[in-house]
Amino acid sequence: MTLIDSNLIFTDVEVDDQIQIIDFLADKLFINGNVKSTFKNAIEKREQKYPTGLPTGIVKVAIPHTDAQYVNQSTIAFANLKHSIEFQNMAVNNETLKVSVVVMLAIAEPHGQVKTLEKLMSIFQDTNLLGFLSDEQDSTKIYKKLVTLL
């Protein structure tokens, strides 16, 4: 079973801040049946305490996620943004990053997040691939690429 659902790939998303993109993706996951109603609040609280912005070269990424107890079925929601927005750097306190790709994890297995994060980190280290994920407007092409990688 793949973690990728073609209904959860969004391109050219226009939001003003990290709360809007977290709410947008969490709502899509809830409508799709992947997460519980408590997921959105849990992921917002976790993002405040443990930021998920990654300084991944030219294209910055955020990977908001929370605990397995809020998830019904494992999946990933993906969005590339029309305009970059600020997320806190996960590695440096009080540093913000201009993020243009957001990958929200909804992983039902308590230890499944680590393996998924490792795969994502490998993807994010490939600058050409990350550029494709950031710039591509065809969600089907992004879906097909992510299926082969995850």
Image (cartoon, rainbow, N blue to C red):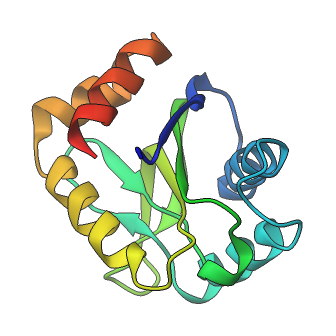
- Judging depth in this view, the residue of 145 and 83 nearest the camera is 145
Q: Is residue 43 left or right of residue 95?
A: right
Q: Position of residue 27 (x, y in %)?
A: 81, 48
Residue 69 vs residue 21, the one in the foreground: 69
Residue drawn at the location 28% of the way across and 42% of the way down: 59
Residue 5 position within the rendered picture, expressed as x and y whole percent measured from the top left: 54, 35
Can residue 57 be spotted in the picture?
no
Instruction: Establish if 77 lies above or below 109.
Output: above
Can residue 44 be seen at all in this image of the molecule? yes
Can you give x and y, in whole percent of width and height, for residue 99 in the image?
Answer: 44, 48
Name the residue at the front extreme. 1
Query: Percent x, y for residue 140?
Result: 45, 14
Residue at 71% across / 42% down in the picture?
Answer: 16
Give whichever of 130, 33 is nearer the camera: 33
Q: Quadrant of residue 37?
A: bottom right
Residue at 33% in and 64% down: 116
Task: Identify which residue is drawn at 41% across, 74% down.
Answer: 113
Quadrant of residue 26 within the rendered picture: bottom right
